[in-house]
Amino acid sequence: MDKIKGTVLRVFAKDVNTDEIISGKYKYDELDIKKLAFHTFEAIDSKFYEDAKKVKNPILIASENFGCGSSREQAPWVIKACNVSCIVADSFARIFYRNGFNIGLPLVECKDISKNVSQGDELEIDFSAGIIKNLTKNETYKFKPIPEFMQKLLDAGGLMPYLLKNNGFGE
Amino acid sequence: MSKTMAEKVLSKKSGTDVFAGDLIIAPVDLVFAHDGTMPLAIQQMGSGLSKQSVFDPNRVVGVCDHASPSPSEKVSNVHSFMRKFAVENNLQFFENGDGICHQIVVERFAAPWKVIIGADSHTCTHGALGAFATGMGSTDVAAIMVYGKTWLKVPESFKVEITGQLPEHVHSKDVILHVIGEITADGATYMSMEFLGDAVDRMSLASRLTMCNMAIEAGAKAGMCQADEKAREFLESHGRGKEYAPLAPDKGATYADEITVEAEKIEPMVAFPHKVDNVAPVTQFEDVELDQVCVGTCTNGRIEDLRVAAQILKGKRTAEGTRLVVYPASRGVLLQAIKEGIIETFLQAGASIGAPGCGFCIGRTVALGDGEVALSTQNRNFKGRMGNDNAEIYLCSPATAAASTITGHITDPRGA
Ligand code: SF4
């Protein structure tokens, strides 16, 4: 994975938790992620699912600690199922961050991104160079490139395809 | 070079000297998941790895606890899916009513120096016994179920030094709420919180479990306590004395951050809606009227917690208009509570008692109504957590919960 070009669909505040991304009340009933995705961000942003369809390659921006709370992998899955191409946040909660790479959803930690970017901005993200270009505002932001192992996960499309390709964890 | 507890356990497991920041492939001693996460892990195994068999059935645990006993057709179908997999693979499988996954793992499987991975964020609980335990998602867990290994970044450590004597009616729950209030919800992100100091040495294992359980609420990857005599006694009382081995950090180990807590100064604390790091002393909330008080969960549903609540409730009744709900953390806890007359005390006080499991915690078998206010011994007060986006949740210790049940509003247990 080298570059992604897309439009900022939302700029979220600090501490968005996994209950807000997908409420625990749904995840025991529904095993079909596509159906579950209908409820993405429902509690804090009822138009999210519909709006996500209107934008090409939606990118989400968030302040600190995005995805805190439970380990539910349904959270990154439903976001991916809404066609989100990448999430850029000031920082992520640990389990969410790991889950993102495991399912092949690129996540970028970039300090102060939530202050610099607005909804509707066009961004171009270069993963290996660690650069985000804001085409609307004509600005550039730098981030620490993703560690090699995690880059491999993204290239493979997630942990499962990576394990299949390498016949396990190797060593 | 001196090591933290996390570095020691992960060095031993990976067979090399590792320090914070190193990426390792580690063998996993125990992997578990529940009805909210295991079905997705099973699907991942099937669709991603085309494998439906586990590496070692004795090291894989499945528990139906989150929506248990099943409240709906759909959940029952999910349970059936999971049960079928468990039977086919001969897993360690626990049914509706056996208890919360973490309590089952603590009672039967957790031990010092083990690497324990659960598909649940509160897996950090098990560090109270000196294990390196952390929560992961279903894909990770699927990979572990097949290969018995996982990739881990050795975390930096955050030292939480707790000194002195806790005042009466002040518990480890108040300490951890205080700490989270101080360092905030992302104060220990990616770190191992290591709880040290003479106050921790004196704490029961139950009290340590409560603190490690909530390490994730400060963003931590793991929570850890030393494996000492208390850990040995606990393992012995559960027939697993042989699994004991001492664990302590090396002198001079490097901590990325630290905080010291003087136990004498801690008051009963409350986390107010809708964030766990919204913390203040109980005395600031005494006018908050309560529709429901909840005692239980993997944070505070152990026998020690029920004892504390029952002692305050003995001979008293819940206030008119306030409901009390009690969910023991496991079948063993419920049995012991029955033997000690604790369940009788709760019932006479007007409580409804639920089957051991997560119960009210995520609103799956007990939900709040619109505009209702609950006070709970659980670990999270996020919006919608108890099944209703228009309800408010306050968090506290079992002592504060019991005292508040009697008055019907949030109440300082030091007067009870
Ligand atoms: S009791 Fe609550 S926090 Fe603990 S495992 Fe169950 S749902 Fe999660």
Image (cartoon, helix red, strand yellow):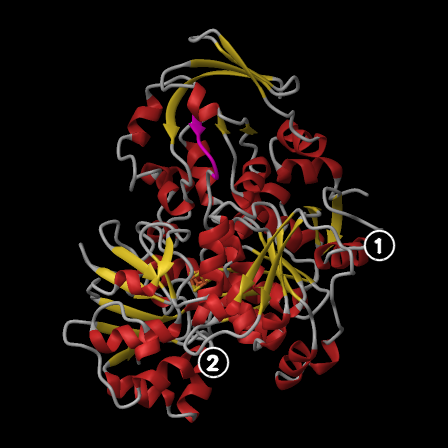
Q: Amino acid at mark 1?
A: Gly
**Residue B321 picture quarter:** bottom left
Question: Where on the image, by quarter, is ligand 1?
Answer: bottom left
Tell me which residue sits at (44%, 19%) in the image: A116
Report x, y in % for residue B118. 57, 58
Tell me which residue sits at (50%, 67%) in the image: B210
The kind of secondary structure element at disc 1 is loop
Q: From the viewer's perspective, is residue A98 above or below residue A156?
A: below
Task: Look at the numbered disc 2 and say if its residue's Cβ is closer than 8 Å to ligand 1.
Answer: no
- Mark 1 and mark 2: span between their CA atoms? 38 Å
For the record, the magenta segment spans A60-65
Q: Amino acid at mark 2?
A: Glu
Q: Earlier in the sequence, mark 1 or mark 2?
A: 1
The kind of secondary structure element at disc 2 is helix
Work out which quarter of the rendered image holds the C terminus of chain B and state it: bottom left
Which residue is nearer to you in this view: B18 or B145?
B18
Q: From the viewer's perspective, is residue A50 above or below residue B43?
A: above
Residue B372 seen anywhere in this rendered image of the structure? yes
Q: Which residue is mark 1?
A: B15
Q: From the viewer's perspective, is residue A16 above or below residue B8?
A: above
Report x, y in % for residue B7. 75, 54
Q: Which residue is mark 2?
A: B304
Asked if disc 1 and disc 2 are in contact, CB closer than 8 Å, the reply is: no
